[in-house]
Image (cartoon, rainbow, N blue to C red):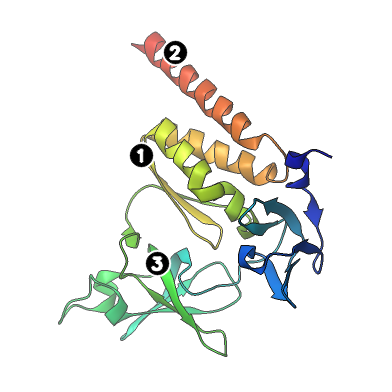
Amino acid sequence: MSEKSEKRVIVMPGDLVSTNPRAAGYGTYVENGKVYARVLGLLDKTDTSVRIIPLNGKYVPSPNDVVIGIVREVAGNGWVVDINCPYQAFLPAQENPECRPGKKANDVLDIGDAIIAKVVSIDPKMKVTLTMKDRVCRPIRFGRIVAINPARVPRVIGKKGSMIKLLKSELGIQIVVGQNGLVWISGDRRKVNIAEEAIYIIESEAHTEGLTDRITEFVKRRKEELEKEGTRNG
């Protein structure tokens, strides 16, 4: 078996994946100085890190996660937000920089509004507290939100953000991937369409090798088609 294919084997919960506890990453746990898979997924291993890309599963919030949510209720002291998971999330008014004295909560965010937020904490009853006091956070007033399986998020982002950087640089668009499986895309409508198609391909082929090369080829081919179409219409 080649070194490349060894990095892309499917592992089961409890499988030994490394003897270096310092390498433990997403989807793993350490026991007696060894690293084991926590979930069913794809082993992604380098000399310095090991993580498991889940093949299926629901979103479970963790502190500092970036999420995209929809406001479901407005209260006097903040907003109840649906973050695509079984647990209720709450954005306190003091955690929204757009709140000002004398401004009503529903004048800032109303039911149905979408936001990019970060998870601050999860209490023992699984109540999730959010904040918008971060550079990446914002209300979503334009663009498009697409939904993917939360288990595919690491693959859509790519190693060190490589897949998202590829889409951004090739298409000249904005993308924010929520850990909860919602993705915000903004820019030229036709290029947003290409990005959405690419994201769905990544989601469906997350377990396959050579995916980055295929996505690169796909995006360049679709861009060329757009340019030819523009030339014909011009």
Residue 27 placement: quadrant:
bottom right
Q: Give the residue at mark 3.
A: 117
**What is the crowding at mark 2: few (fewer than 14 residues within 10 Å), some, or many (at least 20)?**
few
Vertical order, 187 against 80 (above or below): above
Residue type at tag 1: Gly
Vertical order, 89 against 174 (above or below): below
Question: Which is in the foreground here, disc 2 or disc 3?
Answer: 3
- Give the distance between the C-alpha atoms of the residues marked 1 and 3, in whole angstroms: 20 Å
Say whether residue 214 is visible: yes
Q: Which mark, residue 187?
A: 1
Mark 2 or 1, nearer chain start: 1
The percent position of residue 89, horizontal first and vertical second, equals 48, 77
- The residue drawn where x is 55% and y is 29% is 216
Question: Which is in the foreground here, disc 1 or disc 3?
Answer: 3
Front-lying residue, 25 or 75: 25
The percent position of residue 163, horizontal first and vertical second, equals 52, 42
Secondary structure under badge 1? loop
Residue 204 placement: quadrant:
top right
**Left or right of 104, for residue 205:** right
